[in-house]
Image (cartoon, rainbow, N blue to C red):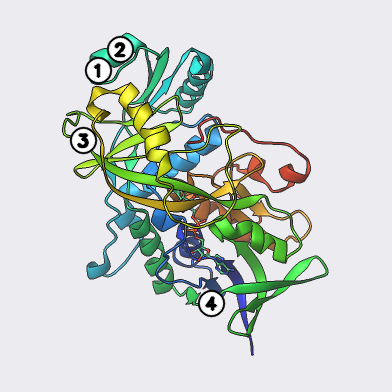
Amino acid sequence: MTRSSDIAIIGGGVIGSAIAWWLKAHFAFPGSVTVIEPDPTYAEGATGRSLGSLRQQFSMPENILLSRFGLEFVRHIRNHIDLPEDETPDVQFRDGQYLFLATEAGAEALRSNVATQQATGSPVALLSPDDVSERFPWIRVHDIALAAHGLRDEGWLDPHALLQAFRRGARRAGAAFLQDRVTAIRCADNRVSELSLAVGETLAVGQVVNAAGPWAGAIAAMAGIALPVVPRKRTVFHVTTPTPPTDPVLIVDPSGVYVRPEGNGFLTGSSPLPGEPDPDGGSLDPDYDQLEGRCWPALANRSAAFEALRMTGAWGGFYDYNSFDQNAVLGPHAEITNFHFANGFSGHGVQQAPAVGRALAEWLLQGRSVSLDLGLFSHDRIAANRSVVERGII
Ligand SMILES: Cc1cc2nc3c(=O)[nH]c(=O)nc-3n(C[C@H](O)[C@H](O)[C@H](O)COP(=O)(O)OP(=O)(O)OC[C@H]3O[C@@H](n4cnc5c(N)ncnc54)[C@H](O)[C@@H]3O)c2cc1C
C-alpha cells in the first residue's frame, strides 16, 4: 500500500518532534506532516539519554543564538505549546551556572570565546584564579589560568519532557506520528519520491527531513548522500559525596571532564581527548572504566569535595556526532533539494531543538531560514571541506 505525505520527518526525537510542532502548530501548515518513529518509548535515542544542559558559552555567535532562543522558549513553554490542562508542559527548567576552566594552554581560546559571547549579548564574565577562589572557595585553582562564568541564562531541563511537549503539541495540531522505520529512500530526477517502511508499505513524499539523530548518516546513505554523522557513545555517572559544596556550579574542567549538580548528587562524564579512541556504534552499556580512569581523578584534583565519590548510577547514550566538524548540518541538500538535514548536534541538540525546529520549518515552507541566518551550517561545506569550528564542544 502507498500512502503519501507533503512533508515526512524521519525520526521523532526532540528535533523531529520540534520541526513537526513548528510546521503544524506555529505556522499552521495546511498540508500533511508525518513523523516516522519506530520507538514510541524512545529507549535508545539521544534525547532521552541527554543531560539537557543549556548554555550561552559557545564560541560561534550562531550557536549562542540558537541556544538562547532555546532558553527563551523553554522558560515560556506554556505560552508557546498549547495543550490541555492535564498535559501542560513542564520541562523542569532549573537555572544553573556554567564555569569553564582553562589552563595556560587554553586561556587565549577561552578569552576569545568570552569576547564573542559578550559581543553577542551573553552575560558571561572572565574570572582570574583569585576571583574563582573568592567566589567558589571549594574549587582548587593551582593549575588554572582563567575561567569563564555564566552569570545567568544557563541551566538544565528534562529533555524527554521537552520531546513529549513538542510531540503532543504537534499531534494536537494535526501531525501524524507513524510507528515505523524507514528502510529505503527512493530518488528520481534529483528528488526523493518515496520512503520504504519496515511494515512493507511505502510513503510518497513531497519533502523529507532527516531527523534521525545518531543514525542520520545511515538515513542519508539511503538517498546516496554522504553525511558524516555517527553514533558515538558517552557515559554519564551519577555520584554522591559526603561533603558536597554548598553552591555547586556546572564545571567544564580543562581535562574534558564535566560535573553538574543533580538531585542529592552530581552528574559527571567526559568525551575522549583528541587522539583517544572514539569508536562508532557499539552497545549502550556504560563504560565504567571512565569513572575511575578519567572522571574521579579530574574531580579529585579540582576539589576536596570530590575526593570521596560514590557512584549511584550510570547510563550510556549516543551522541549524534558529526565527525567532520562537530557542528550541526542544517537545511536542504544542494542537488536533492527536497531532502533536508537537521543533524550532527554533537552534544548540544536538546538546547537547540526549539530554534532548529523553527529554522527547518522556515526552510520547508519559505525556502530559507528566516529568523536566524544559519547558512553556514549547510551540508555543502562537507564536500567543500569547509569546516565550521565550534570550540565549545563538551
Ligand atoms: C549522554 C548525552 C548527553 C547529552 N547532553 C546534552 C546536553 O547537556 N545538552 C544538549 O543540548 N544536548 C545534549 N546531548 C545531545 C542531544 O541529546 C542530542 O543532540 C539531541 O537529543 C538530538 O535529538 P534528535 O531528535 O536529533 O535525536 P534522537 O533523540 O536520537 O532521535 C532520533 C530518532 O530517530 C529514530 N530513528 C532512527 N533510525 C530511524 C529510521 N530508520 N526510521 C525512522 N526513525 C528512525 C530513533 O528511533 C530516534 O528516536 C547529549 C547527548 C547524550 C547522548
Answer yes or no: is residue 18 visible: yes
| Residue type, numbered disc 2 | Asp
Task: Give the x, y percent position of residue 329.
Answer: 62, 48
Whole-number angstrom distance, CA of label 3 to CA of label 2: 25 Å
Mark 2 or mark 3, which is nearer the start of the sequence?
A: 2
Q: Which residue is mark 1?
A: 135
Q: Which one is nearer the viewer's eye here, 324 or 342? A: 324
Could you say whether the residue bearing mark 4 is in a helix, strand or loop?
Answer: loop
**What residue is shown at x 57% (from left), y 55% (from top)?**
281
Whole-number angstrom distance, CA of label 3 to CA of label 4: 44 Å
CB atoms of marks 2 and 1 within 8 Å: yes
Q: Which residue is mark 2?
A: 131
Callout 4: CB less than 8 Å from ligand 1: yes
Could you say whether the residue bearing mark 2 is in a helix, strand or loop?
Answer: helix
Whole-number angstrom distance, CA of label 2 to CA of label 4: 54 Å
Occupied quadrant, residue 94: top left
Q: Residues within 10 Å of mark 1 (few under 14, many from 20)?
A: few
Q: Which residue is mark 4?
A: 180
Residue 216 left/right relative to 284: right
Could you say whether the residue bearing mark 3 is in a helix, strand or loop?
Answer: loop
Mark 1 or mark 4, which is nearer the start of the sequence?
A: 1
**What residue is shown at x 48% (from left), y 73% (from top)?**
175
Q: Nearer the viewer, mark 3 or mark 2?
A: 3
Whole-number angstrom distance, CA of label 2 to CA of label 1: 6 Å
**What residue is shown at x 50% (from left), y 31% (from top)?**
392
Q: Which one is nearer the viewer's eye here, 307 or 183? A: 307
Q: Which residue is mark 3?
A: 241
Answer yes or no: is residue 361 visible: no
